[in-house]
Amino acid sequence: MGIKKQLYNSIATALFVGVWFSSPLGAQTQATSERLELLFEQLLEAEPEEVERIEGQIISEWSKSGSAAMDLLQRRGEDAISDGAFDVAVEHFTALVDHAPDFAEGYHGRATAYYNLGRYGPAIDDLRQTLVLEPRHFGAMIGVAIILEEFEKLRDALEVWELVAELSPADTEIEAVIERLNTQLSGEAL
C-alpha cells in the first residue's frame, strides 16, 4: 500500500491506523542513518511496484527508538489509537515526548491522537516538531496536507503533496492526489 492509500485508510480509522514511526536524529546510529540514506535513494529511483516495500523499510528504520521503555510507551499509544481511545493515546505519547524529546514518532503519534480529537492546533504543532526532527517524514507531511485540505487550503495542501512526491516520485497514489488537487484548483480559477 502506497502513501495515498495509507492516507485514505487512516482517515477512515485514525489518520494513520498503524502509526508511522520516526527515530530521533540524535539517537540514530551511524548504521541506521546510512540505511535510511540508502533507502531514500532507492525510493527516488523505485519502480511503482517497489514503493510500498521501500516505504515499509524506511518506516522500520524510523521505528528504532533504542529504548525498551520508550518502545512500550509508543506501543501503548498506538494501541490506544487503534482502540479509539485518543485521550489515552495523548497521555502515552506525551510521556514519550517528555522522556524522549528527540524521538520524532512521539510527536507524530500524539499529532495523530490530537487530530482525531479535533484538536488541530496541537496536531499541527506536533507535526511541525516531527518534521524538525525528521524533515523527510512523509507521514507527518501527509498529516499536514490532510489538515490543510480540511481547512480548504488546497494550494498549500498541493505544495505539501508535491514535497511528498519529491521523496517518492514513483508512487502513483501521490500522483493521483496531486492530479485531484490540480483539478479542484483549476475549477476554482474558472
Image (cartoon, grey):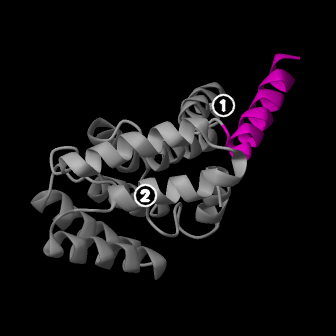
Residue identified by numbered label 2: 59
Q: Secondary structure at mark 2?
A: helix
Whether residue 14 appears in this view of the structure is yes
Q: Quadrant of the N terminus?
A: bottom right
Q: What is the three-letter code of the residue carrying label 1?
A: Leu
Residue 59 vs 121, above or below: the answer is: below
Q: Nearer the viewer, residue 57 or 158?
A: 57
- Residue furthest to the left: 99
Residue 65, by quadrant, is: bottom left
Verify whether residue 175 appears in magenta: yes
> Is 64 placed above or below 55 here?
below
Residue 24: percent from left, percent from top:
23, 49
Residue at (68%, 44%) from the top-left corner?
47
Q: Is residue 137 visible?
A: no
Magenta-colored span: 170-190
* Few, some or many residues within 10 Å of mark 1 (<14, 14–19, 20+): some
What's under tag 2, amino acid-wise?
Answer: Ile
Q: Main secondary structure of the magenta part?
A: helix
* Residue in the foreground of this view, choosing between 171 and 111: 171
Residue 107 located within the stretch drawn in magenta? no
Q: Residue at x 48, y 44 (%)?
A: 138
What percent of the width, then of the height, locates residue 31?
24, 50
Between disc 1 and disc 2, the foreground one is 2
Q: CA distance from mark 1 to mark 2?
A: 27 Å
Q: Nearer the viewer, residue 158 or 40?
A: 40
Label 1's element? Answer: helix
Left or right of 59 on screen, residue 164: right
Q: Write down the residue under mark 1.
A: 154
Residue at horizontal 63 percent and vertical 40 percent from the top: 149
Residue 39, image x and y in percent?
45, 46
Percent across and percent down for residue 166 are: 56, 30
